[in-house]
Image (spheres, rainbow, N blue to C red):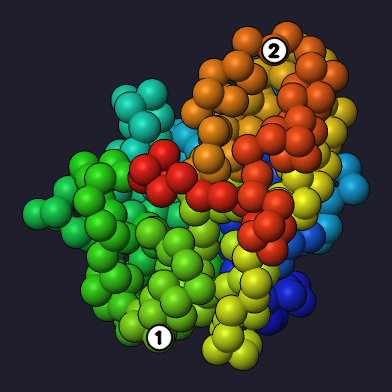
Amino acid sequence: MDFLGFSLRNNLFVAPMAGVTDRPFRQLCKQLGAGLAVSEMVTSNSLLYGSAKTLRRANHEGEVDPISVQIAGADPVMMGEAAKYNVDHGAQIVDINMGCPAKKVCNVMAGSALMQHETLVAKILEAVVNAVPNTPVTLKFRTGWNRENKNAPTIARIAQESGIRAVAIHGRTRADQYMGDAEYDTIALVKSQIHIPLIANGDITTPEKAKFVLDYTKADGVMIGRAAQGKPWLFREIEYFLKTGMHLPAPTRAEIHHILRGHLLELYAFYGEDTGVKIARKHISWYTKGIVGAASFRHAMNQLPTTQDQLRAIDEFFLDTLVDHAANDRVVIDHAEAA
């Protein structure tokens, strides 16, 4: 897929997720079938550029091109400065966050709260585009700020007129948070009204759902977030289904173990021992969700203090216990625990 001058493997995008889409996760998703992965949100507050957290989020060493960095804020000047800062530090695409519904973001008039202020939206978009004239700028937003005010078509028009090169739309309003089901009518409407690429996002959890959303909205691609947590191979499954109409076999317990172990090692190297152990816990929880015995395993895992303790527990869980060795090397799913 050609996207903003870059040749992508496909039209499958990893959604930016705070605390999740760090460099190890982005790299893993790309290895397992994603065409592009957007970084977790970086603040536009220049006072935070020197913080350890911000420096980690801006670390793209060894990452496969293109490097897409998401910025968030409500001040046009600061947003322009943030865009330039990130381009100077390796960003090849700058993405603007107007989709995050979190209170700590919206309470400072950033994220999806901006959708209520269309004049300010235009100022921010123009400031960022003008600050990095040689770098594509994209925008992620929602269908509206509540169900009575679905102004995504207006925001998309403002974006296009401001020089935004592509948009991604989550099929919920800000007020919806992540509740209920995503809707795609608004996304389809926006796609029919603009000529820049549009990426559809929201509740894309299976290969069939990805195909349905692409067909229904006529979107240029799909963006996948929470469904890939603990299941980064979802991208290759969708890629294969879109190409062939058939399903890849589910990963074996041995492959899940291998992927998880490799992911943990990358997390430890990226964050260091103490932070790495803490960050790893949520990923281990996601990878093991639904497997027989996982609930008690996770409880014990959260008490382990070192990386070696975590790795040893993972090895024992996948190789020695709680697995049906006779079932074609597949993990045994506890459907009640998975729900």
Query: Which of the image's four quarters has the N terminus?
Result: bottom right
The residue sitting at the front extreme is: 326
> Considering the numbered disc 2 on the image, is that residue within a helix, a strand or a loop?
loop
Of the residues shown, which amino acid type is indicated by label 1? Asp
Which amino acid does the dot numbered 2 rest on?
Leu
Report how far apart the C-alphas of labels 2 and 1 lie in the structure: 46 Å
Is residue 237 visible in this depiction of the protein?
A: yes
Residue 332 at what x, y percent from top left?
Answer: 56, 50
The quarter of the picture where residue 262 lies is: top right
Q: Quadrant of residue 314?
A: top right
Q: Residue at x 54, y 18 (%)?
A: 299
Identity of the residue drawn at 47% across and 67% down: 206
Query: Which residue was labeled with disc 1?
Result: 215
Residue 85's x, y, as percent? Answer: 72, 38
> Mark 2–mark 1 contact, CB under 8 Å?
no
In the foreground, 219 or 30: 30
Tag 1 secondary structure: helix
| Residue underneath mark 2 | 304
Quick one: label 2, few (<14), some, or many (20+) residues within 10 Å?
Answer: some
**Eyeballing the image, is 4 above or below 171?**
below
